[in-house]
């Protein structure tokens, strides 16, 4: 059994395993979202859109670090059991011929799903500091959605 599986199986309460899995899923989601925006930056975008997308990459990376920090607080010195994929549909690989507006529309859907994910996670935690962080992240995902919406309108 590898160290990752051992650390998960050693948890005795369902809540602890659930918390471990939820945090790992949140980290994976942030990794995938940042990658989506990096891929979008490789496309032909209006110059005014580019800095907005670059900022989204930075924010998603910050969210990932926040979740890694929360994980470390709850499970010191434990390996994070990252899933291969999050359950949020993220277009990490962008096929040739896809237009920037199609990518932005998909990213908007992803941001809405992420907002709902973080909002739903609030119910899973009793720690008020973690609840505030999740509320903040949900609000950030909503802001990302609105930024993308404005950029999409500029492309049309």
Image (tube, helix red, strand yellow):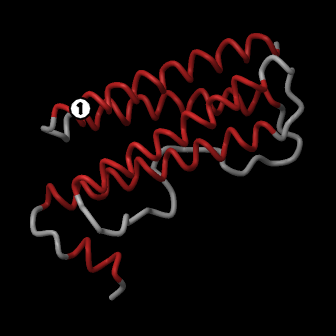
Residue 152 image-quadrant placement = top right
The residue lying toward the viewer, choosing from 76 and 5, is: 76
Image position of 66 with respect to 56: above or below: below
- In the rendered image, the residue lying farthest to the bottom is 1
The spot of residue 154 in percent (x, y) is 79, 11
- In the rendered image, the residue lying farthest to the left is 13
Q: Residue at x 60, y 36 (%)?
A: 58
Residue 36 image-quadrant placement = top right
Q: Quadrant of the C terminus?
A: top right
The spot of residue 13 in percent (x, y) is 10, 63
Q: Which residue is mark 1?
A: 131
Mark 1: give few (<14), some (14-19) or many (20+) Cα within 10 Å: some
- Secondary structure beneath dot 1 equals helix
Image position of 2 with respect to 38: above or below: below
Count of numbered labels shown in the rendering = 1
Residue 33 image-quadrant placement = top right
Q: Residue at x 72, y 16 (%)?
A: 151
Q: Quadrant of the N terminus?
A: bottom left
The spot of residue 86 in percent (x, y) is 47, 52
The spot of residue 28 in percent (x, y) is 48, 53
Q: Report whether 129 appears left or right of 61.
A: left
Q: Residue at x 21, y 33 (%)?
A: 129
Q: Residue at x 10, y 69 (%)?
A: 12
Q: Report whether 117 appears left or right of 18.
A: right
């Amino acid at each position: 059994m590898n160290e990752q599986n051992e650390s998960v199986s050693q948890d005795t309460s369902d809540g602890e395993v659930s918390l471990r899995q939820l945090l790992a899923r949140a980290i994976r989601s942030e990794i995938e979202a940042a990658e989506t925006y990096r891929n979008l930056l490789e496309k032909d975008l209006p110059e005014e859109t580019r800095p907005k997308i670059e900022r989204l990459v930075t924010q998603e990376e910050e969210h990932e670090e926040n979740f890694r920090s929360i994980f470390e607080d709850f499970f010191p010195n434990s390996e994070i059991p990252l899933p291969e994929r999050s359950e949020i549909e993220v277009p990490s690989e962008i096929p040739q011929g896809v237009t920037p507006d199609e990518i932005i529309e998909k990213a908007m859907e992803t941001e809405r799903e992420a907002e709902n994910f973080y909002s739903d996670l609030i119910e899973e935690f009793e720690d008020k500091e973690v609840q505030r962080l999740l509320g903040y992240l949900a609000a950030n995902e909503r802001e990302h959605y609105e930024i993308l919406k404005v950029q999409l309108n500029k492309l049309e």
